[in-house]
Amino acid sequence: MQTAEPAAVPAPPAPRAWFRRALAWVVPTLFGLFAAFLVASAGAVLMRTEWVSRDGRMAFPLQVRQRVNVLVMGVDVTLNNRRQPVNLARSDALLLATFDPQTRTAAFLSIPRDTRAAIPGHRGWWKINAAYALGGPELTIRTVEQLLGVPVHRYVKLGPHSFARLIDAVGGVWVDVERDLHYEDWWAGLRIDLRKGRQLLSGQQAMGYARFRHDPLGDIARVQRQQKVVQALFHRLKEPQTWLRAPQILQAVAENTHTNLTPHEVATLGWFLRSLGPERIRTDTLPGHFAPLFWEPEPQKVQALVLELFYGLRPEEVSRTTVVVHNASGIPGTGLQAAERLRRMGFQVVRVDSAAGERTYTAVVSTRGDAALARAVREMLGVGATAARPQPDAQADLVVHVGVDYARRLRQLSGTPPTSP
């Protein structure tokens, strides 16, 4: 018995050519518009929540555009004779960090707490850690800027237990403890009990390791241990599993620090560090020597180190560079102060004079077309704009037109209240 073959199902009609062509451009166009809408919406929200850097140094998403210098201040607690905290805290640790997107490097300069420094608005010489007790983060920043000739763009203040909580947020840090460390200060509530060898330190243990001072080098050895903990923290941040803790880390930063970094800027700098190899991260201590009561900075060594770490310049290159300064601020002496700042950094200032007109903004012009050098000098002054215009017959390698903005910058550094323009 033969079975009837099933009737053939007619094939669907082929789409017309015009319909296929329409799909080819309509779908990508709609997808692109939708993606643009999402990006624009996210950008608008981030702008409203200050997730975009206002000075253009960092931008969404997680981009470092210009060099960023961040001063980290660890603040101690002073106790009275009843073991009660009093309002006289000093900076227990100072670390100036710099992040350079041009060379994709980062550097961290430790400033010993006993460093001899002039504090703006206060006569005589002081230990630099007194700046915080006299004027908080603002005066500490001005003191560091005056000591090094480096602008501070952001700051982070850590309380006595903040560092330990940040270490715990990343899951602890691996440190090779160089020898057995034992110390107990019942009055300050500090107990250190660590064995020699490589080990995972909790936040409390890492804080004790970094604070230990009872050895022949005193505070300098303490600074070296602080740098080891900071390097261990960097290695921890580079581990993929650590980034699963990003919410806890950001929460720890928000709850245990006082800073003018936004959450996006914190994440941006963390992401930048994560992308760097160990050879691109450098740690140093302010060059100096022990003196009665102070850590005495050695000016020539400090100058060379600052030029290298914070401006990407070689001292021999700077010493060969000639500069002409025109005071166009309308305020006598402003040009001389700009010239003195550049001389202190090692430049040859060959002439300082007054300009005929007044300029609102400072301008740094490289007459040999070196844009990087002009940007570095602009950073030294802290204000203004730059230009690179090759001029073979120019009298100097750099021409600086000092404007009203630099006069305001000087008032800010000295602590003098700003006047109306």
Image (tube, rainbow, N blue to C red):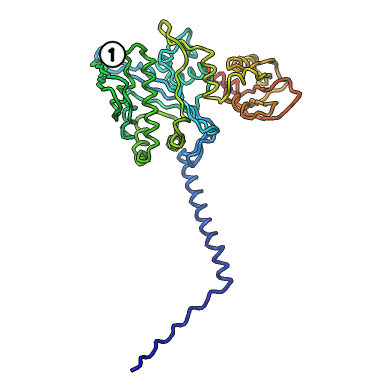
Residue 417 visible (yes or no): no
Please state the total of marks drawn on the protein image.
1
Residue at 34% across / 31% down in the picture? 166
Looking at the picture, tell me which residue is in the foreground, 119 or 147: 147
Residue at 75% across / 25% down in the picture? 392
Dot 1: few (<14), some (14–19), or many (≥20) neighbours within 10 Å?
few
Judge whether 256 appears above or below 299 on screen.
below
Q: Amino acid at mark 1?
A: Asn
Outermost top residue: 292
- Dividing the picture into quadrants, the one containing residue 403 is top right
Outermost right residue: 393
Position of 25 with respect to 235 (left or right) is: right
Write down the residue under mark 1.
80
User: Which quadrant would the N terminus be assigned to in this image?
Assistant: bottom left
Position of 241 with respect to 16 (left or right) is: left
Residue at 48% across / 19% down in the picture? 144
- Dividing the picture into quadrants, the one containing residue 208 is top left
Horizontal and vertical percent position of residue 341: 59, 16
